[in-house]
Image (cartoon, grey):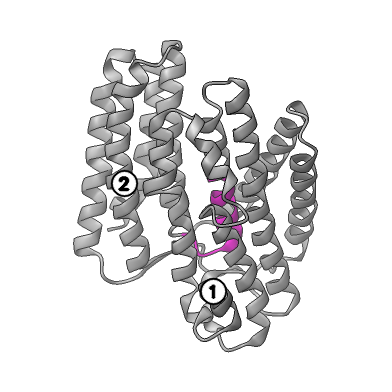
Amino acid sequence: MLPVIISLFLIPVISGCLLLVLPWKLSKPLVVFSTLLISAASVYLFIRQHVPIELPVPGYIDKVVAVADILLLVFFGWIAFRMKSAITVVLSLVQLVIFIYLLNEKDANHGMQFSIDMLSVFMFLLINVISGVILVYACRYINEEPCSVMRKKYFLAIMFGFISVMNLLVCANDLEYFYLFFELTTLTSFLLIRFRQDKDSESNALTALWMNQVGGLAILAAIFLIIHNGYGYPGFSNLIVNADSQGMLAPVALLCVAALVKGAQMPFSNWLLGAMVAPTPVSALLHSSTMVKIAPFIILRLSPVLHDSPVAMVLSA
């Protein structure tokens, strides 16, 4: 099963890279073939995979993830500086400072970085089958877009990257890894929303960027509270193990804030409305199959901790 799971991460990345170098006439066959592969893999896992799988990674991957997080925040800050968005600059800098601090505080004894259970498998099915259909439609749609061939290939490649990141996000147990994938969905959605590069696209993409960074800040704050309250490893599994502890309610509440941001719930709904300026496949991808589904995924993942809690009452109100 493990090779099938890993293929869901690798196939979209490889396909996106191939799109950028192959002739445009091969783009549609490549997209169709790749989406059939990841759809078939997700259906196979849904039928056959009923036992949770824990997937540890080598220690050096932790360092790679840490560097990637830092570079991503620096990139967000640079984009915000170029686009003269003070709020995005501040959010990027605050997250960068907190993240570097947490790197020094985090216990060297890590838990499991990835855990694939039935919720992850169901999300694989949702992400890859529906997004695959959208990608195939996007091939025809983007072919009629008034832009260069390279821009068209770039558009499809970003969509493939988005799918790969989503597949990683729904099986991340370590909250530091989850934070990286959460912010990578922010990056890819920002790039897709601003694809047309007109004034409205730039403005709405920037709104999506800073609003989703509020969710990233909430995740970092949750990690901070878990570590400083003495609960050790910041991971979903550890949250569930300590579900009866009152000290876990604050981190869980912060993770729910991140869910509300991605789910475009009030008062964070403007970013999703603004995404409508992007090409139609982007709206379909963000609204139907992936981006907003992070919200119910986080709530379901945290449901053992949320049960009969004040946080659950607020969410359901």
- Residue at point 33% right, 23% down? 141
- Number of the label disc, if any, that sits on residue 128: 2
- Residues at discs 1 and 2 in contact (Cβ within 8 Å): no
Callout 2 secondary element = helix
Instruction: Note whether 157 is above or below 169 in the view shown.
Output: above
Callout 1 secondary element = loop
Q: Nearer the viewer, residue 43 or 49?
A: 43
Q: Give the magenta-colored segment's residue range.
A: 172-185
Instruction: Note whether 150 is above or below 94 in the view shown.
Output: above
Q: Is residue 56 visible?
A: no
Residue at mark 1 to residue at mark 2: CA–CA distance: 32 Å
Say whether residue 183 is magenta: yes
Say whether residue 44 is magenta: no
Q: Is residue 302 visible?
A: yes
Instruction: Note whether 1 is above or below 139 in the view shown.
Output: below
The image position of residue 274, as x and y in percent, is: 55, 37
Toward which corner of the image does residue 259 lie, by quadrant?
A: bottom right
Quick one: label 1, few (<14), some, or many (20+) residues within 10 Å?
A: few
- State left or right for residue 244 relative to residue 134: right
The image position of residue 116, as x and y in percent, is: 38, 64
Q: Nearer the viewer, residue 203 or 127?
A: 203
- Number of the label disc, if any, that sits on residue 317: 1
- Residue at point 70% right, 31% down? 79
